Image (spheres, rainbow, N blue to C red):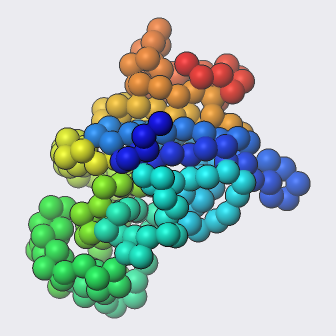
Amino acid sequence: MDTTGHIVISNLSKRQGGRDILNEVSFVARPGRITAFLGPNGAGKSSTLRILLGLDRSIGTATFGGRNYVSFAAPLKVVGATFDGIGGNPSRRVETHLKIIAQSNNISIRRVSEVLSVVGLSNRNKAKLGTLSVGEGQRLGLAAALLGDPQYLVLDEPTNGLDPTGIRWFRTFIRQQSDMGKTILLSSHILSEVEAVADDVIIINDGRIIAAGELQHVMSNLESLEDVFFSLTEGGRGDGGIF
């Protein structure tokens, strides 16, 4: 398979504390599509994302366009991620925070004002990180992810803390990014929002992929993604089968 523009997870396996955290996890996220990565707490989502972003090790491979995250000299120019919060000193200003991140990856500081405009935080550029609301923090995380204009976006719970206006904004934002041909891997617990934006769905439970495919195919014969999710993870199929 030509992996250009693809996120490819292949046969990831990891044991911890005498149990399988991941068991031969494999899936693909394709360019120009929004791939939702779903599962209950403890299912293996975070472990998979940590391995993908070079924060943990395992058996198997996790690549962006055929390359490991750690192989990129300036990773933010290739991969933008929101994971484990925004970080940064609470007394640091938003603009300064983004400039530091940009400089660490040899990105022009001119991008700072551009990405703040994209996420609707231009009027908060002088605000201190510690004064941001949860929703504003989410938008700042997205701004940081966009700094290098990356091909790949890996977004963990990006709508957490957003108000209804913010969620509506996010739907438009993420679709625009997808329409630009970017490869988007989105993890979220808000299934109704996932259903509103996703093209493809991957569901993991107990460290195994139990469903994967186009959203409408995975939802066949069920009214909502929530119905699919709970039928698979609460005593339903959950046997490692793929739709």
Q: Position of residue 88 (x, y in %)?
A: 40, 83
- Left or right, residue 21 beside residue 168: right
Q: Residue furthest top?
A: 221
Q: Residue furthest bottom?
A: 91
Q: Residue at x 60, y 39 (%)?
A: 26
> Eyeballing the image, is 193 above or below 125?
above
Q: Position of residue 11 (x, y in %)?
A: 67, 43
> Eyeballing the image, is 236 above or below 61?
above
Depth check, front residue: 9 or 158: 9
Whether residue 234 is visible: no
Q: Residue furthest right?
A: 18
Q: Position of residue 239 (x, y in %)?
A: 72, 24
- Left or right, residue 129 beside residue 217: left
> Eyeballing the image, is 94 above or below 180?
below
Picture quadrant where residue 214 is located = top left
Quarter holding the C terminus is: top right
